[in-house]
Image: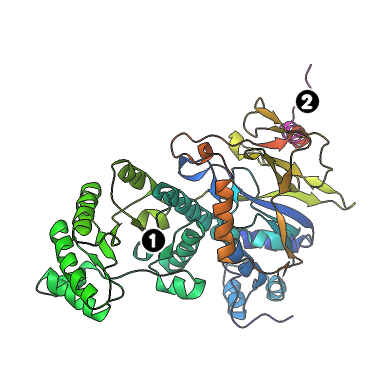
Amino acid sequence: MQPRDSGGLGLLTDLYQLTMAYGYWRLGRQEQEAVFQLCFRRNPFGGGYALAAGLEDALAFLEGFGFARDDLDYLATLTGNDGAPLFEPGFLDYLGGLRFGCSVEAVPEGSVVFPHEPLLRVRGPVLQAQLVESALLCLVNFQTLVATKAARVCQAARGEPVLEFGLRRAQGVDGALSASRAAYLGGCAATSNVLAGKRLGIPVRGTHAHSWVMLFDGERQAFEAYADCLPNNCVFLVDTYDSLAGVRQAIEVGRALRARGHELVGVRLDSGDLAYLSQEARKLLDAAGFPRAVVVASNDLDEHTIQSLKGQGAAIAVWGVGTRLVTGHPDGALGGVYKLSAVRAQDGSWQPRVKLSEQAVKVTNPGILQVRRFRGPAGFEADAIWDESRPPPAEWEIVDPLDPTRRKRLPVDAPYADLLVPVLAGGRRVGAPGTLEEARARAAAELASFHAGVKRFLNPHRYPVGLERGLHERKTELVLQARGLPLHTS
């Protein structure tokens, strides 16, 4: 198979993935089967959950994975510390014909997930599974972070529309598009990002900025001119000079709009005491006969600010959230990891693998892992991480991965569902691609099925997630063996 002349994102990786791949190839182990799991170690934002996102973009990457001719030409220029080529031509020829052929199981986008649970599992030739690590983490980590932030912001808004306004503060063009996608998945009603609207089908919203007002000799003239141009899109930004005076000017222009058969949609506040100004703006609008005109607010909002404004009785009906949403403030990243958990031995059996650490949270879980979510009378009750290469137990008991004294037994007859489902088989899609609307609906439904304490911002309830007891015992044995300690003590 000849390398492609263009396209593909094979070089979207860290160099050490390629040096390891070269080593596998040199040793003749490139086809040895292995299993890698993608998970994260702590909930973002000090919260009680995360919202899985980024899977569809990850699958599109895997389906198109490959190295173009100019990719191989570039790799041929890389040298080691002795000045000699880093990779030999035979390896580059191998990469030129490489296509992704692993099988992938994943948690559907929009699912509520928790630390240590695999969001995605890759099984197949170790060289291929290794090469896609960095890109998968890039695609899943960021969107999961932003989708989770969006869900929290929308929760704080208590059902009122949240508009994602983050394009100008996003981390580059791709970051802006990915953030718009994840924010919509997490519950935002619309975006200001027109390219995201076109490519992803997300509703777009927006009217004018302060520069429009400043271009004219007065605020009234600016509003009138905008109303003449776009009479069906009038949310006036009123805080360029004096916010409440701006509301009064908007009302006067709104009366003229109404006389022409149009309605004032609302006013937007972007600075100042949003609680007080929104209340006063609401009074002015109502007294002038515009009870349906909304007060929109922006200005570095997040879930905590919105919750505070709600507590102060702010009369805000639509929330524009930008910087702190699309950057995942205050968390810079989700912190997801992608770890080897099993390899296929020559006799065909699967051998579990575990990585040790001085930090308990960084000790990995071995095996071909699956997540079984149990439901109780009042909603989701607990998640069990278990090894699919072994039969499931007759009775389920889960052990906290970080505190083995914390255990929970689950009813024998409790209904359940396994979260990881096949999405790629031999590198090819299983079933139709999931849609963004489906993921958005799933997120809303799943969040509604969890106890309110799990979604609390301050000191959230810790949802029970643990290793199935047999998996916990095997992990303990592997850790003791790796540390040269006896398996049993008297």
Residue highlighted by disc 1: 163
* Quarter of the figure with residue 103: bottom right
Residue 450 position in % (x across, y down) = 57, 42
Residue 255 located left or right of residue 318? left
User: Could you tell me residue 168's position as x and y percent?
Assistant: 34, 65
* 128 magenta-colored: no
Identify the secondary structure beneath mark 1: strand
Where residue 141 sits in the image (x, y, percent)? 54, 55
- Residue 370 in sight from this viewpoint: no
* Kind of element beneath mark 2: loop
The magenta span reads: 475-490
Residue drawn at x 74%, y 27% as measured from the top left: 485
Q: Of callouts 1 and 2, which one flags the residue occurring earlier in the amino acid sequence? A: 1
Residue at numbered disc 2: 486
Percent position of residue 10, x then y: 61, 70
Residue ranking furthest to the left: 217
Using the image, determine if residue 90 lies above or below residue 451.
below
Snapshot quadrant of residue 374: top right
Whether 390 is drawn above or below 294: the answer is: above
Q: Amino acid at mark 1?
A: Leu
Above or below, comparing residue 129 to residue 414 in the picture: below
In the rendered image, the quadrant that contains the N terminus is bottom right
Work out which quarter of the rendered image holds the C terminus and state it: top right
- Side (left or right) of 292 relative to 245: right
Nearer to me, 408 or 405: 408
Density class for disc 2 (Cα within 10 Å; few <14, some 14-19, many ≥20) is few
Q: Please indicate, yes or no, whether residue 151 appears anywhere in the rendered image.
A: yes
